[in-house]
Image (cartoon, rainbow, N blue to C red):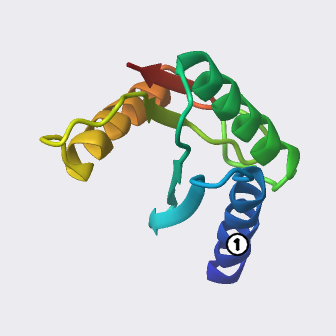
């Protein structure tokens, strides 16, 4: 029920926070079951590696997910975007690209990351 869902959100949030070790790295909940991680000063390969670590860590929490066709444990899909921001680009712009990539990751089978530049 709701209590289990709340505990799951807390565990995921704590795991993400623990992985954000560098100054300028942030993890926060957007709402519902969506979280956002901002990791600054990473290139494409570093971003991909970091996202893969997140995927491994979350599944490693071994939170039961009996209704999933992907895994018996909770997994995450990640959409990411790597860019040097320009003054004309808004937060909404970056979030919309990351969100598009998230839906692509889900559409391709979940438990994966899609990163674009």
- Can I make out residue 70 in this image? yes
| Viewer-nearest residue: 112 or 19 | 19
Q: Quadrant of residue 51?
A: top right
In the figure, residue 23 lies in which quadrant? bottom right
What residue sits right under mark 1 in the picture?
A: 10
Judge whether 7 appears above or below 115 on screen. below
Identify whether 112 is placed above or below 56.
Answer: above
The N terminus - image quarter: bottom right
* Residue 66: % across, % down: 75, 49
Say which residue appears at 47% left-offset and 23% top-offset. Answer: 115
94 left or right of 2? left
**Helix, strand or loop status at disc 1:** helix
Residue 32 is at least partly visible in this image: no
Point out the residue furthest to the left here: 88
| Numbered-mark total | 1
Residue drawn where x is 69% and y is 83% of the image = 3
Residue placed most toward the observer, 55 or 85: 85
Residue 28: give x, y in percent of width and height: 54, 64
Front residue of 73/79: it is 79
Quadrant assignment, res 11:
bottom right
- Left or right: residue 54 versus residue 98 is right
Q: Residue 49 in the image: x percent, y percent?
A: 69, 24
At horizontal 70% and vertical 72% (from top left) the residue drawn is: 10
Residue at 38% from the left image edge and 19% from the top image edge:
117
Q: Residues within 10 Å of mark 1 (few under 14, many from 20)?
A: few
x and y percent of residue 8 in the render? 71, 67
Q: Is 72 above or below relative to 51?
A: below
């Amino acid at each position: 029920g709701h209590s289990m869902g709340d505990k799951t959100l807390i565990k995921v949030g704590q795991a993400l926070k623990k992985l954000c070790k560098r100054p300028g790295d942030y993890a926060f909940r957007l709402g519902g079951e969506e979280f956002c991680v901002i990791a600054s000063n990473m290139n494409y390969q570093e971003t991909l590696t970091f996202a893969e670590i997140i995927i491994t860590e979350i599944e490693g929490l071994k939170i039961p997910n009996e209704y999933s066709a992907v895994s018996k444990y909770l997994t995450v899909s990640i959409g990411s975007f790597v860019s040097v921001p320009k003054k004309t680009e808004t937060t909404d712009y970056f979030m919309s690209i990351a969100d598009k990539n998230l839906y692509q990751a889900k559409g391709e089978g979940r438990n994966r990351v899609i990163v674009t530049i």
